[in-house]
């Protein structure tokens, strides 16, 4: 238990939230925000830092991120003031951002958050998109739940 406790103490001392994007790192601004080679016209907004890590592992984008710190959940008492939504709007208001990609969960709370942010960003000249929902790569159709299959049918694309 000693080495585990020591590792947790060190992590607690070194890990900080980035003052620009809200992601976690050992430096502020974080490694991604400090990287001038990153595309600044696209901003991926996610509910948690772990989603940014997953997007980085997928190597699908060289864009910048914005971590909200959760999702709106009126039943749990989580409102807009509890999340980093104002920071996202401020970054868009500064200019230079052409697209905000909402990488939120396909849950009621995630979709509520996405709709709320879309409304807040409507006065700005920015395109708001979201990740596709539906059939996972390698997924077998007969094992999908009804909601996933219905979303995949609605969001079908030309082959």
Image (cartoon, rainbow, N blue to C red):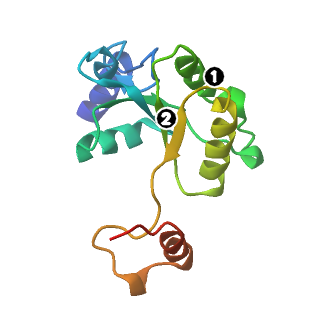
Q: Secondary structure at mark 2?
A: strand
Q: Quadrant of the C terminus?
A: bottom left
Furthest residue to the bottom? Answer: 142
Residue name at image x 60 percent, y 23 percent = 89
Write down the residue under mark 1: 86
Residue name at image x 52 percent, y 52 percent = 105
Q: CA distance from mark 1 to mark 2?
A: 14 Å
Q: Is residue 103 visible?
A: no
Q: Is residue 49 above or below residue 138?
A: above
Q: Residues within 10 Å of mark 1 (few under 14, many from 20)?
A: some
Mark 1 vs mark 2: give the one in front: 2
- Circles 1 and 2, Cβ within 8 Å, touching? The answer is no
Which x, y percent locates residue 56?
Answer: 28, 39
Q: Is residue 1 above or below residue 92?
A: below
Write down the residue under mark 2: 100
Residue name at image x 67 percent, y 42 percent = 72
Q: Secondary structure at mark 1?
A: helix
Q: Report which quarter residue 69 is drawn in.
A: top right
Q: Is residue 46 visible?
A: yes
Residue name at image x 33 percent, y 17 percent = 14
Q: Residues within 10 Å of mark 2 (few under 14, many from 20)?
A: many
Which x, y percent locates residue 119?
Answer: 69, 37
Which x, y percent locates residue 127?
Answer: 53, 36
Q: Is residue 88 left or right of residue 140?
A: right
Which x, y percent locates residue 101?
Answer: 47, 40
């Amino acid at each position: 238990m000693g080495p585990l406790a020591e590792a947790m103490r060190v992590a607690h001392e070194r890990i900080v939230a980035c003052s620009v994007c809200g992601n976690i790192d050992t430096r502020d601004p974080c490694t991604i925000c400090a990287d001038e080679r990153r595309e600044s016209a696209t901003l991926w907004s996610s509910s948690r830092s772990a989603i940014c890590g997953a997007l980085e592992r997928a190597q699908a984008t060289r864009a910048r991120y914005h971590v909200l710190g959760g999702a709106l959940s009126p039943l749990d008492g989580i409102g807009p003031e509890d999340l980093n939504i104002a920071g996202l709007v401020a970054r868009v208001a500064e200019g230079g951002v052409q697209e905000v990609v909402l990488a939120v969960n396909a849950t009621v709370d995630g979709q509520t958050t996405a709709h709320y942010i879309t409304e807040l960003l409507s006065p700005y000249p920015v395109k708001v998109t979201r990740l596709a929902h539906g059939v996972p790569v390698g997924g077998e159709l007969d094992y999908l739940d009804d909601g996933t299959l219905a979303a995949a049918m609605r969001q079908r694309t030309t082959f």
